[in-house]
Structures are given as structure tokens and as C-alpha cells.
Image: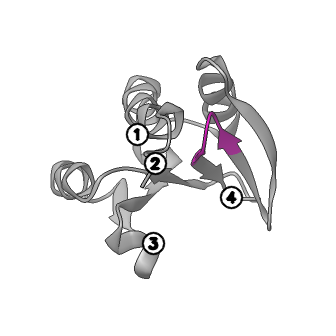
Amino acid sequence: MATAEDFRRIALSFAGTTEAPHFERAAFKAVRIYATLAADGLSANLAFTPEEQEFKCLLAPEAFCPIPNAWGRQGWTTLTLAAVSEAELQSALDMAWKHGAAKKKKR
């Protein structure tokens, strides 16, 4: 069972990650925001691709679900921390961090 403290420690261990307030949440950013932690510390939102989101939600529906809005259709996924192990949290954050650390493509 992962906690908000586990989330924060793991997220901040990734290269270039900083934490800053983001509305009522804490945002974790490398080049871009890749995760946010709810104020109550019970859930987090992670940046996945739509395909990664579908896989995570099928694999562990008790832990992962799409955010129910346009952000969710882009891959942003809510994670219930108590439903994952620390190793599962590490894996999910690593996946999200790769998206947040990637340079933005120029148009």
C-alpha cells in the first residue's frame, strides 16, 4: 500500500523533478508536469498515453481510472495510492516521468 510520502519521495527522485503548488494539488514537473498529488494524499493524477492508460486501467481497475474529462481522453489517469504497492507506484511514476521529461516537439 503506497502513501503520499512514498509518492513524493519517488517522484522527487527522478532527474530534474521539482514540486510546486498547482491549484489544490501538488504538481511534479520535469520539463512538463507529469503528475499531481491530491491535497488529501489519497490519489494522484499521472500523464500516460491513451494506450498506456488503457493498459493500466485493464490491468488494475481498482487502482487506475481515466480522469473523466478531456484530460482523461488525452491519457491523464487517476491512481488510488492505497491500491498499489510501492513497486507498482515506482513503475507508474517512471512511465509518467518519461512523458514529463521529454522535450516539447516544435511545430
On the rendered structure, is 52 left or right of 104? left
Q: Amino acid at mark 1?
A: Val
Residue found at x 39% / y 71%: 72
Instruction: Give the residue number, with chain letter if any, for mark 3.
Output: 71
Q: Quadrant of the C terminus?
A: bottom left
Which label sits in the foreground, 3 or 2? 2
Whether residue 31 is visible to the viewer of this picture, yes or no, is: yes
Do the residues bearing badges 2 and 4 touch, measured as CB atoms within 8 Å? no
Task: Give whichever of discs 4 and 1 has the lower sequence position.
Answer: 4
Count residues near mark 3 (Cα–Cα under 10 Å), then give few for <14, some for 14-19, many for 20+.
few
Q: Of residues 101 and 67, which is closer to you in this image?
A: 101
Q: Residue 20, how many percent across, how many down? A: 82, 45
Q: Residue 67, how many percent across, how many down? A: 43, 71
Query: Mark 3 falls on what kind of element?
Result: helix
Task: Compute the Cα span from label 3 to label 1.
Answer: 22 Å
Q: Of residues 52 and 63, which is closer to you in this image?
A: 52
On the rendered structure, is 87 left or right of 12? left
Task: Give whichever of discs 2 and 4 has the lower sequence position.
Answer: 4
Task: Compute the Cα span from label 2 to label 4.
Answer: 31 Å
Task: Give whichever of discs 3 and 2 has the lower sequence position.
Answer: 3
Q: Of residues 32 and 42, which is closer to you in this image?
A: 32
Do the residues bearing badges 4 and 3 touch, measured as CB atoms within 8 Å? no
Do the residues bearing badges 3 and 1 touch, measured as CB atoms within 8 Å? no
Q: Is residue 91 above or below residue 46?
A: above
Query: Mark 2 falls on what kind of element?
Result: loop
Count residues near mark 1 (Cα–Cα under 10 Å), then give few for <14, some for 14-19, many for 20+.
some
Task: Give whichever of discs 4 and 3 has the lower sequence position.
Answer: 4
Which label sits in the foreground, 3 or 1? 3
Residue 14 appears in which quarter of the rendering? top right
Q: Give the number of the disc on residue 84.
A: 1
Q: Give the number of the disc on residue 106.
A: 2
Q: Which residues are magenta?
A: 28-34
